[in-house]
Amino acid sequence: MNKFITCLSAALLLTLTQTANATDTLRPDQAAYRELYKELVETNTTLSSGSCTEAAEKMAARLRKAGMPESGIHLITVPEHPREGNLVAVLQGSNPKLKPMLLLAHIDVVEAKREDWTRDPFTLIEEDGYFYARGTFDDKAMASVWVDSLVRFLQDGFKPKRTIKMALTCGEETSGAFNGAQYLSSEKRELIDAGFALNEGAMAQLDEQGKRLMVSLQAGEKTSQNYQLEVTNIGGHSSKPVKNNAIYHLAAGLSRVGAYAFPIHLNDATREYFSRMADIKSGAIGEAMRELVKAPATASNLITDDPLWNAMIRTTCVATMVSAGHATNALPQRATANVNCRIHPEESIEGVRKTLEDLVADPEIKVTTKEIRGPATKAPPLTKAITQPVEKIASKIYPGVPLLPIFQSGATDGQFTGAAGIPTYGVGAYFIDPDLGGIHGLNERIRVQSLYDGRDFLHELVKTLANTTSAIP
């Protein structure tokens, strides 16, 4: 028993020592931010068992403590979704002629099962230069910085010329869930009305050796859409198999979908991205990028074999879920698959459905469009009013690292604000490992230094844009 107590005490002492070592070298403002970040990350906001409302209330309490009046704090829930709350905070500017800016971030996270993770996904753990936990990057890094910046502005007595609005929303990570950004854009438009918005969607990239490659500014994104492929037949006893098997039909159709490559489409962001990335990569890859810009239809495998680059230049569709059969000793009566497509703005949701129908080339396979997440949006303009401040601050925080525009191959809540007439830009402030740090997967992580540097970057950017009198975008 005494040995057990001694071991327990030693473990507790080690934990306390590690925590102290993790914070004793931080600036006071960084230590305060780490506490805020920890609180937000450790608040479970999964759809199944968490509460965005609890997280929103905690962040609102921090703003109140910093001195934000109640008139600037708006906690928004709907009766049907009491745990999927949102927070809008408003710091009034001194110049009413300037359009407000909106700081957008989602606070819900992807599901995480403790039994699958090496560490507790809802305990912030600092280890070997990384923060581990669900949401450490996506998207509580940005959400925590927005709150932290408002707190610092309030504490410092900073009076922005441009009104700063912040919207922390729920529902971004789950198709079909109540989406706070969509609700605010359609039902509370005046509350988040702004001339432009800063959002997630861009990433600063590291190479395999940890060298900084680029800071990014997102201008435009794809539309995420799910389709169902379904085969039904009468089934029967497995001792008398027939060729008309629902599983075989579905499998053959999915194979044809998997082998297909949608047409290549370039826009202003991707043209500039590949033109500038060609100088960074050089060699055969650099030349392939130059050729891509000149003649997109002849893209080299050096480009299309890379999942990130391939996704930036075309619509992509991939099977994500399959379900079939009803008994181990029976012929399947039903086989279904979900195909998730990320649709380029040059193509339509119905057009992609028709392409899938043509690809499976089987009247037994019914292809239907599932719930539509939201409208497609046009890319916001990359004007100097937005690019120059980002580039200037990036060169200060990350000297020698170029800023490149990107086209987001995924989908963010910018889909809703953009469609509502608020040009929305993703800012890649955090350097992320080539494997994307386990985002949406196991053991999600972000480099500690990357988080603190990204915080400095975003805080200075918000302060700069809030005092810029030129029209943005």
Image (cartoon, rainbow, N blue to C red):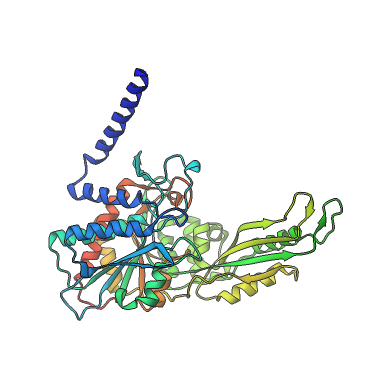
Q: Is residue 21 left or right of residue 270?
A: left
Question: Which quadrant, please, contains the C terminus?
Answer: bottom left
**Residue 107 seen from this side:** no
Q: Residue furthest top?
A: 2
Looking at the picture, tell me which residue is in the foreground, 154 or 21: 154
Q: Residue at x 30, y 69 (%)?
A: 387
Q: Quadrant of residue 257?
A: bottom right
Q: Is residue 426 left or right of residue 61?
A: right
Residue 394, image x, y percentages: 28, 59
Residue 255, image x, y percentages: 69, 60
Q: Residue furthest bottom?
A: 97
Residue 390, image x, y percentages: 28, 65
Q: Quadrant of residue 379?
A: bottom left
Q: Is residue 462 left or right of residue 55?
A: left
**Residue 377 seen from this side:** yes
Looking at the picture, tell me which residue is in the foreground, 356 or 327: 327
Q: Residue furthest front?
A: 79
Looking at the picture, tell me which residue is in the foreground, 276 or 268: 268
